[in-house]
Amino acid sequence: MDINELKIKVDECKTLKDLNDLKVSLLGKKGPIQALMSKMGTIDKEKRAEYGQYVNNLKNEISDYIENRKVILEEEVLNKRLQEEKLDISLDGIDVNKGSKSIVGGVIDEICDIFVGMGYEVKEGPEVELDHYNFELLNVAKDHPARDMQDSFYISENTLLRTQTSPIQVRTLEKCNGKGPVKIICPGKVYRRDDDDATHSHQFTQIEGLVVDKNVTMSDLKGTLETLVRKMFGEKREIRFRSSFFPFTEPSVEVDVSCFNCEGKGCNICKGSGWIEILGAGMVHPNVLRMSGFDPEVYQGFAFGMGVERIAMLRYGITDIRHLYMNDKRVLKQFKTTK
Ligand code: PHE
């Protein structure tokens, strides 16, 4: 057997399969090496060891040669695959259009977070509300002139789209069986029969807060609102109370924040006054406490309410409330919220 001829055959194998087939035919039971082995018996005794050695060497040489070829072929296969599967990572990927939270949703979360940090619980309630909770338990009887302050969408004589989130507060008080403390923050959509323009919308969002406990005073209200505006509009903000009227609070106040744009010097945002109105607030009216089962001789409370869109508009310098509802993605992209 000519070892060099066998080696040429090995070299001629172009695939791993060919090589394996050749290996089986050369080293297998029916192959030439085995044939040489089986001749052992016919060899003279004294030459047998030498013969055995020779056949073994032949076998080893062929196996090694096949193994070397195998390594080369395997490398070829790998290189070919690498070549074929080459990725060009410098190409642009497909642009995934990732959504973001709405501006109003972001401001709601931010305000709720601030109050949750002060120990408030977030409460929600129905948007289709009973007149009883939306008005009557809030000290606005059927013939009360204050009903004109909030033009309403009635669904039936006693049901309406809530005009404020205050009904959530009386619903919560009613469940407390006259026992405080209560500390809640109530976000939600509200509806009023307003003509839509740059600053009015028939549907908008309010956040109201309520604290009822023993020994609650107006200075607690002031401290709480100061904390809120400083977190929302910066550490240097001041607030001021102006006397006002709401049927469910007494005394009632409008709350202004010192202008974050001009530091109080006067600019177009604060209309030259240095102050911006952002909230309504007051001490809970004894009638409201009484109607929800609390003894006003024992418990006092403060409440406040704000329009979320107004805060968002001030915050982001948006001049038309309708931008917040028009579903124009360019607006959302421009004002990606912090959350
Ligand atoms: N609910 C009032 C409104 O919509 C806001 C407010 C809430 C005022 C709580 C005072 C206290 O006008």
Image: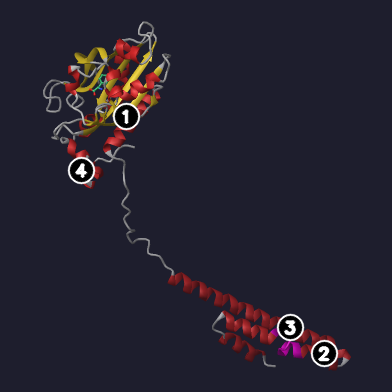
Between disc 2 and disc 1, the foreground one is 1
Mark 1 residue type: Pro
Q: How did the renderer colour the structure? A: secondary structure
The residue stretch that appears in magenta? 27-35
Spatial separation of the CA atoms under disc 3 and disc 1? 89 Å
The label shown at residue 187 is: 1
Q: Earlier in the sequence, mark 4 or mark 2?
A: 2
Give SS at disc 1: strand
According to the image, label 4 marks what residue? 326
Measure how far apart labels 4 and 2 are at the Cα level. 96 Å
User: Separation of disc 2 and disc 3 at Cα?
Assistant: 15 Å
Taking the spot 30% from the left edge, 11% from the top edge, the residue there is: 287
The residue mark sitting in front, 2 or 3, is 2
User: Mark 4 falls on what kind of element?
Assistant: loop
Assess whether residue 3 is covered by the magenta stretch: no
Residue 177, can we see it?
Answer: yes
Q: Quadrant of residue 261?
A: top left
Of all residues, the one furthest to the right in this rendering is 45
Residue appearing at x 23%, y 14% in the figure = 252
Q: Residues within 10 Å of mark 4 (few under 14, many from 20)?
A: few
Q: Position of residue 110 (x, y in %)?
A: 33, 31
- Circle number at residue 274: none
Quadrant of the rendering where the N terminus is positioned? bottom right
Look at the numbered disc 2 and give the secondary structure of its residue.
helix
Counting from the top left corner in percent of width and height, residue 48 is at 84, 88
Residue tagged by mark 2? 40
Q: Nearer the viewer, residue 1 or 214?
A: 214
Task: Estimate the spatial distance between the alpha carbons at disc 2 and disc 1, rounded to whole Å.
Answer: 98 Å
Is 168 drawn above or below residue 38 in the view shown?
above
Q: Which residue is mark 3?
A: 57
Q: Single out the residue that lies furthest toward the front.
A: 157
